[in-house]
Amino acid sequence: MSTYHEQQKRNNTIRLRAILEECPYFLGEFFRAMANTASIKTRVVYAYDLKIFFTYISQHHKKLKGTALEDMQLDCLNEISADDIESFLEYLTYYQKPDPFCPEKMIDIQNDAVGKTRKLAAVRTMYQFFYKKQKISSNPAAIVDAPKIHKKQIIYLEPDEVANLLDLVENCNTDAMSHTQKAHIAHSQKRDLALISLFLGTGMRVSECVGIDLNDIDFRNNSVKVIRKGGNESILYFNEEVQQALLDYIAQREKQKNKAEQEQALFLSNRGTRITVRAVENIVKKYSRITSPSKKISPHKLRSTYATSLYQETGDIYLVADALGHSDINTTQKHYAAMGENRRRSAPNYIKLRKK
């Protein structure tokens, strides 16, 4: 694993410890066990969600109201009912909390069905763990229904939009930018083209992209090594167009000054350091809002564009799942089932019972 990913792991470990210091002590046992099955990023998210849950309990539960989180005992879980958990989910719709940078000011927090489902998953997993170990007498979270998540239409770029986007990045052929903007972009043009081409040509995640080092690229096999969501290494393959964009950028990159500790990073910021996720998101937004103003295109939407194109060309949902790094085929089918339905609807058009 590269130094970048090791540093990310260290940072998340420190974040997890900081969150747990403000949570009930018994969660330590849960998270130590969880380390065997979940990545550090997942554990940080669960810790954050459980802190929100216990904060709600300490503020609104009839018996536990006023109890500091650090004073809560394990048997407090027996005092929490399914109704309490359902009330928590309703509370998540909209609530306020102090601004960490200005405690006198309150900030609004909202959760949709996806956010509520994620938090319920954390509560369920915690209850299941302690119930299985026979440390609590019941598991009320098991009978709480998750909110219904309405299907969202997949947003992706059509082939002509992909072509327009790449042409814009490569040539800056637009009146929507001033001469100053074009001059600024010219400095990073080859990097931006390589970045966007890599997203469209491999379907990688933005977090995977920023972690790529120079030695992760293999031009003999036109492949790139990435660290997937769960921490596993994976090899992605790209075509000759992506290869050329990468070669052109790397040739320019060699002339760019960069900080010693960051010099192995493939994609560099204008300051010579490893590019950040936020910077990549801004790069994609900068170009796509010109070529596709009606769509809010992000790196994830470019990933969807790759997956949509691959499925439309092959009809192989297993290939799409493997290319995207989905561990569960149902995740892929959930998003691309509608396209499969369209393919099935068109099947009769290819069958002629009688030749006329």
Image (cartoon, rainbow, N blue to C red):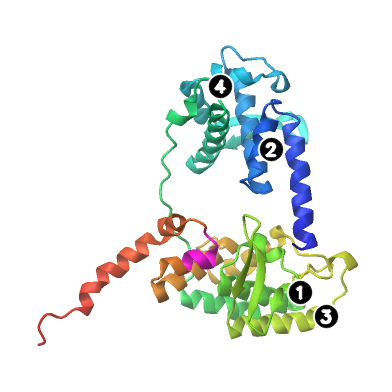
CB-based contact (under 8 Å), mark 3 and mark 1: no
Single out the residue that lies furthest toward the bottom.
356
**In the drawing, what numbered circle is on residue 214?**
1
Between label 2 and label 3, give the one nearer the viewer.
Answer: 2
Residue 75 % position (x, y): 61, 18
| Marks 1 and 4, how far apart at CA | 51 Å
Tell me which numbered mark, 3 or 4, is placed earlier along the sequence. Answer: 4
Amino acid carrying mark 4 in the image:
Ile
The residue under label 2 is 32
Chief secondary structure of the magenta portion:
helix
Magenta residue span: 320-326
Tell me which numbered mark, 1 or 4, is placed earlier along the sequence. Answer: 4
Say if the magenta span includes residue 166.
Answer: no
Badge 3 element: loop
Residue 307 % position (x, y): 48, 68
**In the drawing, what numbered circle is on residue 136?**
4
Badge 1 element: helix
Label 4 crowd (10 A; few <14 / some 14-19 / many >=20): some
Between label 2 and label 1, give the one nearer the viewer.
Answer: 2
Amino acid carrying mark 1 in the image:
Leu
| Marks 3 and 1, how far apart at CA | 11 Å
